Image (tube, helix red, strand yellow):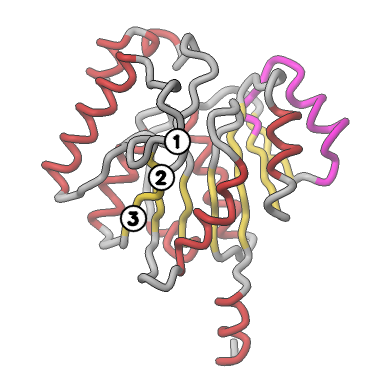
Amino acid sequence: MSDRASMIRAMNPRVLTALPVFNEESHVSEVLSEVLLHTDDVLVVDDGSRDWTAQILAAEFPGIAVKRHPTNRGYGAALRTAFEYAVAGGYDILVTMDCDGQHQPGFLRRIAARIDAAEGPVDLVSGSRYLQVFDSSNSAPAERRRINATITACLNERLGLAITDAFCGFKAYRVSRLAELDTTEDGYAMPLQLWVQAVDLGWRISEFPVPRVYLDEARSFGGSLDDAAVRLQH
């Protein structure tokens, strides 16, 4: 690629927004309609949904790329599929966000732009629900906040990080570095592997404040992980 082409590419990076979904029939239409207002290329990773998610995607969003897992493999597996798709597609930046209404698509362009921001390029931008208070009435469920705080403190101590939110799924990645990862965790603990490997690989990391929104405090993590003590031990 010529220097001029590289400069143009840097000024107008190809950005992919990926949303892992599992049984999101109540949210997928509204969330995707909003996402399409803020980004062009969208991938939905349907992780074996058993409700009407697949039918809604086919009927209402035929132009959106969909990768479907025949069976439910887990959040980590869905993210790996998104990573592989972004690398294969030659994208510059991948933004991941949840499809349950907790992440606001209006922040998509801003979090993607932070990868090559004037204050210094980074390889991973991780959303944080605790850097800034957007709405004081929307507090995190106590057990989720406690587990997040415990794990975040552990990562900071062991890895030399200074993050405030270990588990926010709203992230932006420099795609050229995704192939370096070797994550094997299929479930919700996958972000822990990501943090360890990102530090080991020397990734430049920053956080980005995003609103804290909890629409369904009873949302399942799957099986025994719905028990807070089991989830923390896992």
Label 1 crowd bin: few (<14), some (14–19), many (20+), radius 10 Å? some
Residue at 36 percent of width and 38 percent of height: 191
- Find residue 60 and report its horizontal and vertical position in percent: 85, 33
Label 3 crowd bin: few (<14), some (14–19), many (20+), radius 10 Å? many
Outermost residue on the bottom side: it is: 3
Above or below, 188 relative to 88: above
* Left or right: 138 in relation to 97: left
Q: Quadrant of the C terminus?
A: top left
* Left or right: 125 in relation to 79: left
Q: Quadrant of residue 12?
A: bottom right
- Find residue 167 and report its horizontal and vertical position in percent: 36, 34
- Circle 1: element type: loop
- Which residue is denoted by mark 2 in the rendering? 209
- Which residue is denoted by mark 3 in the rendering? 206
- Circle 2: element type: strand
The amino acid type of the residue labelled 2 equals: Pro
Q: Quadrant of the N terminus?
A: bottom right
Which mark is on residue 134?
1
Q: Quadrant of residue 133?
A: top left
Residue at 88 percent of width and 31 percent of height: 59
The amino acid type of the residue labelled 1 equals: Phe
Closest to the camera, between mark 2 and mark 3, is 2
Q: Which residues are magenta?
A: 46-63
